Image: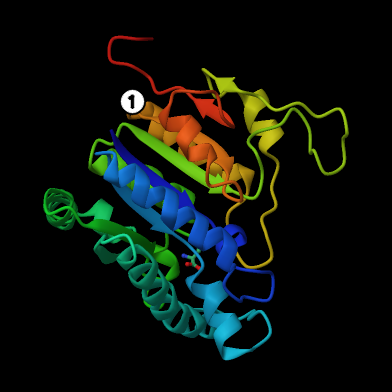
Amino acid sequence: MRIVIKVGTSTLAHPGGRLNIRHTEDLVKVWSDIKNAGHELVVVSSAATGLGVGKLQIARPQDMVTKQAAAAVGQCELMYTYDRLFGQYNHTVAQMLLTWADFEHENRRVNLHNTLERLLELGAIPIINENDPISCEEYSLGDNDTLAALVAECIRADLVILLSDIDGLYTADPHTHTDARLIPVVEDITPEIDRLAGGAGSALGTGGMATKISAARRATAAGVDLIIANGAHAEVLYDIMDGKAVGTRFVGKKEGAQ
Ligand code: GLU
């Protein structure tokens, strides 16, 4: 299988912006094992801004330039961490920093596609993030959920997994409604599903359930299944690979289907 796994800031970093060592180490271990089992893996990783804030020991920036500067610092920290951790399992990582323009312009999209394909052929693990330090509003993707769906579409992945700090999509906000139920499968993204997504993300990341539903809409339209699962439990990835029901699965539209 060719899998795109997106992991959010809330999983990789503590609220103050320091690395969440347990989550990150657990994830890299399981990802390495999935790769060892013969699957192709592309990681879309957030947390550049968050880790930059932690490293610079500043308050969460409100202005764009400081956010971008923090992302430049944090991206180094992020790749250093991945390189070191994946290196323990003899895996090679590759950094790719993208903006909306890379998908919009034909020649850039072709280059992106070719480089990703070659990296996978070479056995490397591409680690992708938005190029935050230079992305201006016009070309900003804004959230890595959308980026993961775009990457999956570009390389015709079999599956996208969005790892978040929540188990999946619920019938109501599980933090405030004790009777909220997890929705295991979504065949169609109806207005009701959009309504359930609401807004809100974590303090340091930019995503939330709404961006995940929007990514699911994009991925499923391209025929790719998308699963939202909890990144705090890396071993759920084994269950996903074994075909067990985990989190919320949005079913990709198959060719010929209505
Ligand atoms: N690209 C941003 C970062 O690395 C995060 C975007 C997101 O949270 O989806 O900090």
Q: Viewed as shown, does residue 116 lie left or right of 4?
A: left
User: Foreground residue, 63 or 247?
Assistant: 247
From the viewer's perspective, is 103 left or right of 79?
left
Q: Secondary structure at mark 1?
A: loop
Residue that label 1 marks: 223
Q: In the rendered image, is residue 145 in sight?
A: yes
Residue 123 at what x, y percent from top left? 17, 52
Residue at point 38%, 27% (across, down)? 221
Q: Residues within 10 Å of mark 1 (few under 14, many from 20)?
A: some
On-image quarter of the N terminus: top left
For image coordinates 27% across by 56% down, the residue present is 125
Q: Amino acid at mark 1?
A: Gly
Up the image or down, 193 lies above or below 13; here it is above
Q: Position of residue 46 (x, y in %)?
A: 48, 62
Question: Left of 15 or right of it: where is 211?
Answer: left
Which corner quadrant of the image does residue 180 belong to?
top right
Q: How many marks?
A: 1
Give the residue drawn at x 59%, y 67%. Answer: 20
Residue 11, by quadrant, is bottom right
Taking the image as shown, residue 169 lies to the left or right of residue 70, namely right
- Whether disc 1's CB lies below 8 Å from ligand 1 is answered no
Q: Position of residue 158 (x, y in %)?
A: 31, 31
Instruction: Tell me where residue 120 appears, x and y as whole percent.
Output: 18, 50
Q: Quadrant of residue 126?
A: bottom left
